[in-house]
Image: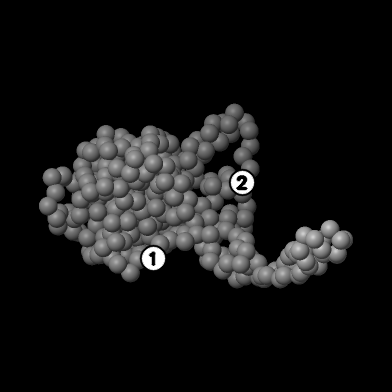
Amino acid sequence: MSSTVTITESTSASASQTQTQEQGQTQKQEQTQFQVQLRSADDGVLNWNVRKVEGLHQIPVFSDKEAERTWAKQHMAAAFRTFARLGWADGASGHISLRDPVNPDWFWINPYAKHFALIKASDLVLVDHHGRPVQPTPYKVNAAGFIIHSSIHRARPDIHAACHMHSPAGRAWSAFGRGIEMLNQDSCMFYKNLAVYEGFGGIVLAEEEGVRLAEALGKNCLNLILQNHGLLTCGSTVDEAAAYFIALERACANQILAESAAANGIAKKYVGAEEAEYTCKCTSTPGCAYMQFQPEFDLTVELSNGKVLE
């Protein structure tokens, strides 16, 4: 839905050369009208676009699938380095998966036991749904990571990327087996877009456990708290999934801080359901989440001197 506002712009133009101006000739006012589009939008928050019609949140579209594969792998590698910079690398634990743009039945995953801060696009491993590499690689793949992600990708064709890390706040809050409350604007990204997987089945080494995780995520939800385990976020792009992970980890940290204050007798105030739903609609679109990650991507590329893209 959009509305149009007409704005009148006044510009002064001299009616003659400088010599004439010195004689005191009056200036002529030219009135120019143009349209400003106020878009509510499909791509998220309200935004003003002067003389333009596109929204603020644009996800690149490719006609060349090989080019899209290269682009997606570079963003995936940057997500790992971003997570490392934020302090979420945890030994050999944690993984991101990416559905391959060329062959959607394959997906990319990180090499086992390689530090997130060192990952380059060329290090990523391409596997089929059985976890078998489909290209030569010197690396191995984490079996637990493969089972979690392959089950989700199989159950949800709309999900092209998934992130799972053992981040500090997410791991701590997962001990309660609860979702997060609508405490602030950022928490509202997860209004009716966050599920909880209750019941820890240990290290995920059985395919049945992966199927149960996919079932807990459901048909529409993109984010999951794994009780006594950590966080898992998904998206149509790796950028969207990474942006959700960053936001959910911080939302868990905020929840823990709020609970600490509440334990000392300070009452919490909540965002109303109507406001939370509207805020979620504005801030949790694929385009909005994609753009939310772009500053992190740019910084990561700069800090690596472009090496992450190799």
Q: Which residue is mark 1?
A: 61
Viewer-nearest residue: 125 or 213:
125
Q: In the displayed structure, does residue 194 sit left or right of residue 62? A: right
Residue in the image at 76% along x and 70% along y: 31
Q: In the displayed structure, does residue 261 sit left or right of residue 109? A: right
Q: Position of residue 266 (x, y in %)?
A: 63, 33
Where does the N terminus fall, quadrant-wise?
Answer: bottom right
Q: Position of residue 38 (x, y in %)?
A: 63, 65
Badge 2 marks a residue whose secondary structure is: loop
Taking 217 as reference, is 2 above or below it?
below
The CA span between labels 1 and 2 is: 39 Å
Residue in the image at 38% along x and 65% along y: 61
Three-letter amino acid code at disc 1?
A: Val
Residue in the image at 18% along x and 59% along y: 128
Q: Position of residue 130 (x, y in %)?
A: 16, 57
| Observer able to see residue 8 | yes
User: Could you tell me how many numbered marks the image carries?
Assistant: 2
Taking 82 as reference, is 52 above or below it?
below
Answer whether labels 1 and 2 touch (C-beta < 8 Å): no
Viewer-nearest residue: 121 or 235:
121
Viewer-nearest residue: 121 or 41:
121
Q: Which residue is mark 2?
A: 270
Q: Nearer the viewer, mark 1 or mark 2?
A: 1
Three-letter amino acid code at disc 2?
A: Tyr
Within the image, what quadrant is residue 215 found in?
bottom left
Instruction: Return the residue found at the far front.
Output: 19
Within the image, what quadrant is residue 237 found in?
bottom left
